[in-house]
């Protein structure tokens, strides 16, 4: 099939590349000419394991092309995916849909024949209705079909999630479109993916409800971890004991930093904002947002306790600064709150991340990027394991740490407290009692 992906951000690029790998002809369009030229040269703007190889293979096989000519790309394609950003509006909690509606206006001028127009971006309920109204200003209703087809891609696992999805949700009341899209996704359905046809509004809400629920699980276990610390209980036991209940499940029940990234922070805010418009109070999700925003403050408080409130001139080393492993995404990462705060209090901060230097910390004079793990840990007073990269899961601290007074705060609970104590290391973790 001939597909056009509008937007070469995380969703558009990964989805477009994977669709081409399934044998489709795909044009990835972006108005950012610099990004398009880089993609044409095989330079990938995001860190996603395996993506560069797929791009090169499908470009070489002439199934994947990159362009900044929206009008011509749309005319050549049968199915159009809108994959532009829907960030939170500045100073509010609503989703900023300006890019979505901007694309819809462009599309309304470019429909030369029947097109299926799909919102792959995460959008609030009724967005599809608005897109349809925009398209109807210049086109008859039989010239297009507006569909919601939300993505469920995890950063760092996106290619696998695309090829082996739990479900494919398609929101449309148009039988013709449903049949075409079921055929498009048939290679994934034959591998076991559940095809879920719904109304367009239901598909829009499924995505938001899913992310809000996962964010709730993370926040819930973090709050239980706070209780564990005060009652000398190991949060790992709680997570295992709960997770084995099939009604609950073990995923997203790992205590640690606040949730971050491109989805959970903005989507939890957007769904509560949408509910408010319909005069529905999503009080649980609002509490989740508030608790998560407070999470970094609690972890900072823990750092102060570990250092006995003596922060000035302390050498603090961060292992990982991205919001999670296997991504270079810094959006809403706990490190963006913790590192500047420690810097302001006079700490000397070094950080090492497998995805390299981060411009977000450039303005802080006493924050330095370390090019290697050993350089980062050298002469540290406190080591903070912030991100659960594999690089940090089997460090021989006993061999590396020269100063016996060095403290380790494992915010991801990667290590056994018993083994760390046995090795005479000053080890602290999350939700396993105060020591």
Image (spheres, helix red, strand yellow):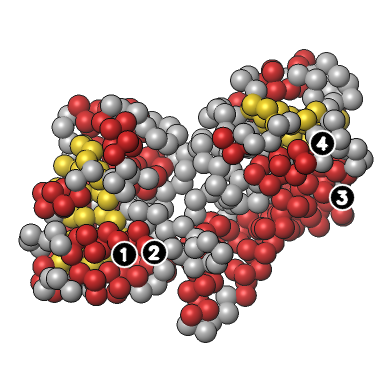
Query: In terms of secondary structure, where does tag 2 sit?
Result: loop
Can you identify the residue that label 2 sits on? 97
Are the residues tagged 1 and 2 within 8 Å (C-beta)? yes
Extreme-bottom residue of the structure: 279
Q: Residue at x 72, y 58 (%)?
A: 294
The dot on residue 101 is: 1
- Tell which tag, 2 or 3, sits nearer the viewer: 2
Question: Dot 2, crowdedness within 10 Å: few (<14), some or many (≥20)?
Answer: some
Q: Residue at x 32, y 43 (%)?
A: 32
Q: Quadrant of residue 148?
A: bottom left
On the image, the x and y values in percent for residue 175 come to: 17, 69
Can you identify the residue that label 4 sits on? 346
On the image, the x and y values in percent for residue 97 come to: 39, 64
Pick the quarter of the image with the C terminus: top right
Mark toward the start of the polypeptide (3 vs 1): 1
Q: Real-space Cα distance between discs 4 and 3?
A: 32 Å
Q: Real-space Cα distance between discs 2 and 3?
A: 47 Å
Q: Is residue 177 visible?
A: no
Query: In terms of secondary structure, where does tag 4 sit?
Result: loop
Residues 311 and 251: in front is 311
Q: Real-space Cα distance between discs 4 and 1?
A: 46 Å
Can you identify the residue that label 3 sits on? 232
Q: Real-space Cα distance between discs 4 and 2?
A: 41 Å
On the image, the x and y values in percent for residue 170 come to: 29, 63
Extreme-left residue of the structure: 113
Residues 267 and 315: in front is 315
From this view, report whether residue 264 is shown above or below residue 286. above
Mark toward the start of the polypeptide (4 vs 1): 1
Question: Dot 4, crowdedness within 10 Å: few (<14), some or many (≥20)?
Answer: some
Query: In terms of secondary structure, where does tag 1 sit?
Result: helix
């Amino acid at each position: 099939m001939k597909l056009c992906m509008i937007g070469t951000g995380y969703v558009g690029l990964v989805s477009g590349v994977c669709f081409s790998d399934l044998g489709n002809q795909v044009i990835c369009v972006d108005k950012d000419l610099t990004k398009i030229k880089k993609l044409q040269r095989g330079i990938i703007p995001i860190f996603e394991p395996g993506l560069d190889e797929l791009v090169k293979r499908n470009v070489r096989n002439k199934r994947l092309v990159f362009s900044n000519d929206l009008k011509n790309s749309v005319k050549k394609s049968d199915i159009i995916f809108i994959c532009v950003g829907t960030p939170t509006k500045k100073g509010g909690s609503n989703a900023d849909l300006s890019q979505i509606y901007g694309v819809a206006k462009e599309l309304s001028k470019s429909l030369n024949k029947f097109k299926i127009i799909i919102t792959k971006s995460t959008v609030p309920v009724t967005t599809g209705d608005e897109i349809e109204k925009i398209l109807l200003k210049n086109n008859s209703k039989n010239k297009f079909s507006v569909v919601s087809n939300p993505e469920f891609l995890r950063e760092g696992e996106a290619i696998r999630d695309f090829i082996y999805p739990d479900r494919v949700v398609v929101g449309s009341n148009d039988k013709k479109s449903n049949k075409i899209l079921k055929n498009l996704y048939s290679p994934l359905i034959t591998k076991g993916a559940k095809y879920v046809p719904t109304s367009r509004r239901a598909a829009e809400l499924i995505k938001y409800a899913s992310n809000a629920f996962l964010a709730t699980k993370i926040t819930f276990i973090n709050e239980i971890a706070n209780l564990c610390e005060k009652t000398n209980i190991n949060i790992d036991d709680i997570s295992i004991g709960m997770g084995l209940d099939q009604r609950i499940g073990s995923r997203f029940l790992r205590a640690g930093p606040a949730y971050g990234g491109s989805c959970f922070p903005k989507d939890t805010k957007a769904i509560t904002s949408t509910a408010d418009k319909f005069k529905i109070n999503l009080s649980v999700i609002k509490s989740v947002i508030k608790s998560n925003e407070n999470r970094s403050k609690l972890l900072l408080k823990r750092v102060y306790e570990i250092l006995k409130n003596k922060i000035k001139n302390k050498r603090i080393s961060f292992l990982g600064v991205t919001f999670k492993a296997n991504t270079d995404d810094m959006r809403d990462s706990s490190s963006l709150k913790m590192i500047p705060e420690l810097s302001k209090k006079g700490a000397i901060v070094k950080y090492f991340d497998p995805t390299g230097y981060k411009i977000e910390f450039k303005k802080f004079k006493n924050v330095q990027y370390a090019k290697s793990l050993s350089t980062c840990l050298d002469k540290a007073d406190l080591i903070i394991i912030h991100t659960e990269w594999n690089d940090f899961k089997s460090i021989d601290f006993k061999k590396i740490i020269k100063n016996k007074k060095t403290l380790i705060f494992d915010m991801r609970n990667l290590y056994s407290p018993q083994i760390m104590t046995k090795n005479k290391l000053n080890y602290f973790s999350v939700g396993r009692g105060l020591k």
